């Protein structure tokens, strides 16, 4: 639920799904529509942060739906001055084998400190700016930012639900193998700009 002073920035990177039209039709005073932004999750999220002034930043992907209690959970988490940010539990839509596998495996990824943007990352603005914000990366912009944050990164058990559209109707083992290979190459130091071109092939 929005409180006084809350801001929402919708950043569009050239979509063709009526995103901008829908936002304009809603006519919500708290929503700022940014229509012209360079494509790429890193640049779009950086632009959204730059166009707002709130002390807490919450990055929610367009295909992700948060639980109704998430905003209050963020405020409570960041009342701790040692916390820089956090994320939520993630659930994929659908009943496919791929969605079921990811829903079971994502809690284990936290052991490896793999916190992806799908899980609706939130961060204190001061810590975000001190870390240098999102870089202009087409992929792994989330891991890059979190690695630079100082302070504790918290996890909430509240759930955000994200679309399984990226792998529905496709051979999931091949898609997952591709994702895993990209992650390994990122750890090995391959630039995100290079990995982004390979990631585009499976989107």
Image (cartoon, rainbow, N blue to C red):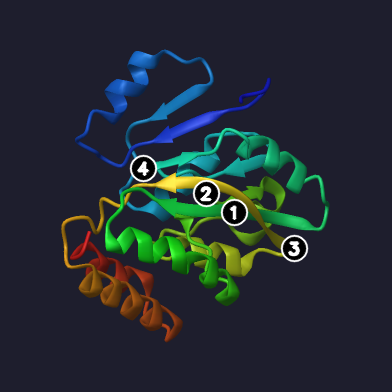
Q: What element carries label 2?
A: loop
Real-space Cα separation, disc 2 to disc 3, in angstroms: 18 Å
Disc 3 and disc 4 in contact, CB within 8 angstroms: no
Whether residue 103 is situated above or below residue 58 in the rendered picture = below
Q: What element carries label 4?
A: loop
Residue 120 badge = 2
- How far across and how far down the image is residue 142, in percent? 49, 61
Disc 2 and disc 4 in contact, CB within 8 angstroms: no
Whether residue 187 is situated above or below residue 83 in the rendered picture = below
Pointer 3: residues within 10 angstroms few (<14), some, or many (20+)? few
Q: Is residue 184 left or right of residue 135?
A: left
Q: Earlier in the sequence, mark 2 or mark 4?
A: 4
Real-space Cα separation, disc 3 to disc 4, in angstroms: 28 Å
Q: Is mark 3 on a helix, strand or loop?
A: loop
- Image quadrant holding the N terminus, namely top right
Pointer 4: residues within 10 angstroms few (<14), some, or many (20+)? few
Name the residue at 68% across, 43% down. Answer: 74
Q: Earlier in the sequence, mark 1 or mark 2?
A: 1
């Amino acid at each position: 639920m929005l409180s006084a002073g809350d801001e929402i920035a919708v950043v569009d990177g050239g979509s063709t799904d009526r995103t901008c039209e829908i936002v304009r039709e809603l006519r919500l005073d708290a929503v700022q529509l940014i229509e012209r932004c360079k494509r790429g999750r890193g640049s779009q999220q950086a632009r959204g942060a730059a166009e707002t002034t709130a002390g807490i930043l919450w990055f929610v992907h367009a295909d992700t739906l948060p639980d109704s209690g998430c905003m209050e959970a963020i405020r409570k988490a960041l009342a701790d001055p040692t916390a820089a940010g956090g994320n939520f539990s993630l659930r994929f839509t659908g009943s496919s084998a791929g969605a079921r596998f990811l829903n079971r495996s994502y809690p284990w990824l936290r052991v490896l400190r793999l916190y992806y943007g799908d899980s609706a990352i939130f961060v204190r603005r001061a810590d975000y700016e001190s870390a240098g914000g999102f870089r202009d990366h087409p992929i792994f912009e989330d891991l890059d930012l979190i690695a630079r944050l100082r302070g504790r990164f918290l996890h909430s058990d509240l759930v955000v639900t994200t679309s399984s559209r990226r792998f529905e109707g496709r051979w999931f083992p091949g898609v997952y193998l591709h994702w895993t290979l990209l992650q390994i190459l990122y750890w090995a130091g391959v630039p995100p700009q290079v990995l982004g071109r390979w990631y585009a092939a499976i989107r």
